[in-house]
């Protein structure tokens, strides 16, 4: 299976946009921490949960069905769900040789409208960890929660709260630096 490609709108040069956390749900059966996030500054019908006809509860149910059928039940997972794409990460499973519970692994990503189709990543494939909102503050805080918790239950009792938003002031600086838009 080749890498999954997701088409996203191009952001005009220097057009800022913001990422915010809209909601949080804990699915204890996995366990799974599920963050519902929006992009502000893009097409609201595509990038804001309140403006779409997508169902957070349907996504929650689809992820739970998918993850209950993996070998990693009991290992904490973190999902970041934008209306256009959902990415699932997990901590290392100590039952698997060479995995460390202090590492994060990409489980898969798929368009949110296909919540039953989260695609597991093969280890030989190159993986993108995630976008800025997935990595900071969500995953950085989740890793901090994991490191500072004495038990899985203590870890599960903590969730990220974003006061305000994470602002991306220019999403095309690297493309310009590499000359793709010259």
Image (cartoon, rainbow, N blue to C red):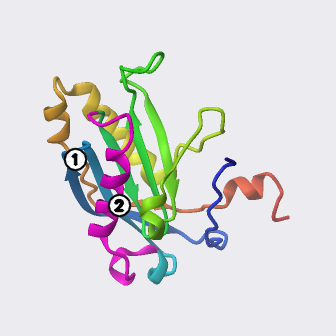
Relative horizontal placement of residue 34, taking residue 133 as reference (left or right): left
SS for callout 2:
helix
| Residue 109: percent from left, percent from top | 51, 53
Residue 159 tag number? 1
Label 2: few (<14), some (14–19) or many (≥20) C-alpha neighbours in 10 Å: some
* C-alpha distance separating marks 1 and 2: 21 Å
| Residue 37: percent from left, percent from top | 36, 63
Label 1: few (<14), some (14–19) or many (≥20) C-alpha neighbours in 10 Å: some
Per the image, is 61 magenta?
A: yes
**Which residue is at a point 18% across and 42% down the rendered structure image?**
158
| Residue 147: percent from left, percent from top | 28, 26
**Which residue is at a point 48% across and 78% down the rendered structure image?**
46
**Residue 86 quadrant:** bottom left
Relative horizontal placement of residue 83, taking residue 58 as reference (left or right): right
Q: Outermost residue, top direction?
A: 97
Q: Nearer the viewer, residue 109 or 51?
A: 109
Q: Which residues are magenta?
A: 47-74
Q: Outermost residue, front direction?
A: 69
Per the image, is 156 magenta?
A: no
Residue 62 tag number? 2
Predominant SS along the magenta part: helix
Q: Nearer the viewer, residue 177 or 25?
A: 25
């Amino acid at each position: 299976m080749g890498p999954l490609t997701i088409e996203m709108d191009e952001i005009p040069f220097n057009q800022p946009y913001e990422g915010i956390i809209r909601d949080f749900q804990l699915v204890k059966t996995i366990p799974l921490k599920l963050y519902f996030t929006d992009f502000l500054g893009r097409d609201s019908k595509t990038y804001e949960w309140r403006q779409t006809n997508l169902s957070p509860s349907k996504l929650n149910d689809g992820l739970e069905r998918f993850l209950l059928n993996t070998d990693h039940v009991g290992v904490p997972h973190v999902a970041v769900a934008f209306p256009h794409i959902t990415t699932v990460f997990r901590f290392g499973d100590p039952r698997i040789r060479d995995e460390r519970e202090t590492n994060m692994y990409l489980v898969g990503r798929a368009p949110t409208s296909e919540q039953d189709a989260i695609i597991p990543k093969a280890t030989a494939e190159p993986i993108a960890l995630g976008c800025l909102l997935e990595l900071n503050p969500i995953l950085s805080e989740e890793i901090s929660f994991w490191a500072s918790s004495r038990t899985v239950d203590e870890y599960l009792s903590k969730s990220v709260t974003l006061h305000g938003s994470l602002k991306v002031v220019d999403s095309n600086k690297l493309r310009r630096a590499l000359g793709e838009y010259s």
